[in-house]
Image (tube, rainbow, N blue to C red):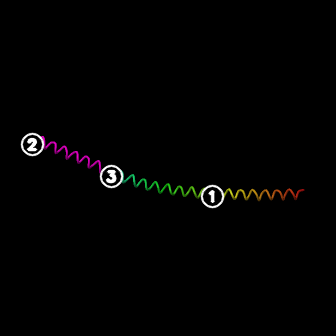
Amino acid sequence: MGNLFEDKKEVKVETLGSLDEKITTAIEKVKALKEEHKVLKQRIEELEQIIRQKDEEIERLRNEKTSVKSQLTELLEELESIQL
């Protein structure tokens, strides 16, 4: 009977050791995922900033296009009036 109890104790110790390893591995994975999440959040913020800058540039170019178009229209009208 003494051996049976000792065997059970060994199995429990092995099981606890296995659980400890699994917990340690899980903690390491969680830490790695948190770091990856942080890096990805920063990258998202950078990309969102780039998008905002591009949107501003697009708006500026649209305004410039409208202005140039208006100036061209005025010049064409002046040319037509001169030719008449």
- Amino acid type shown at disc 1: Glu
Tag 2 or tag 3, which sits nearer the N-term?
2
Give the residue drawn at x 69%, y 59%. Answer: 64
- Amino acid type shown at disc 2: Gly
Instruction: State the residue lying farthest toward the left.
Output: 1
Mark 1 sits on what residue?
A: 57
Instruction: Say whether residue 64 is magenta.
Output: no
Q: Distance between the Cα atoms at labels 1 and 3?
A: 45 Å
Tag 1 or tag 2, which sits nearer the N-term?
2
Tag 3 or tag 1, which sits nearer the N-term?
3
Q: Secondary structure at mark 1?
A: helix
Q: Secondary structure at mark 3?
A: helix
11 vs 41, left or right, is: left
Mark 1 vs mark 3, foreground winner is: 3
Q: Which residues are magenta?
A: 1-25
18 vs 41, left or right, is: left
Give the residue drawn at x 50%, y 54%. Answer: 44
User: Percent position (x, y) of residue 19?
Assistant: 26, 47
Q: Are marks 2 and 1 in contact (CB under 8 Å)?
A: no
The front one of 12 and 33 is 12
Q: Which mark is residue 78?
A: none
Mark 3 sits on what residue?
A: 27
**Helix, strand or loop: magenta stretch:** helix
75 vs 52, left or right, is: right
Q: Secondary structure at mark 2?
A: helix
Quadrant in the picture for the C terminus: bottom right
Q: Which mark is residue 2?
A: 2
Give the residue drawn at x 11%, y 41%. Answer: 3
User: Percent position (x, y) of residue 36?
Assistant: 42, 53
Give the residue drawn at x 31%, y 50%. Answer: 25
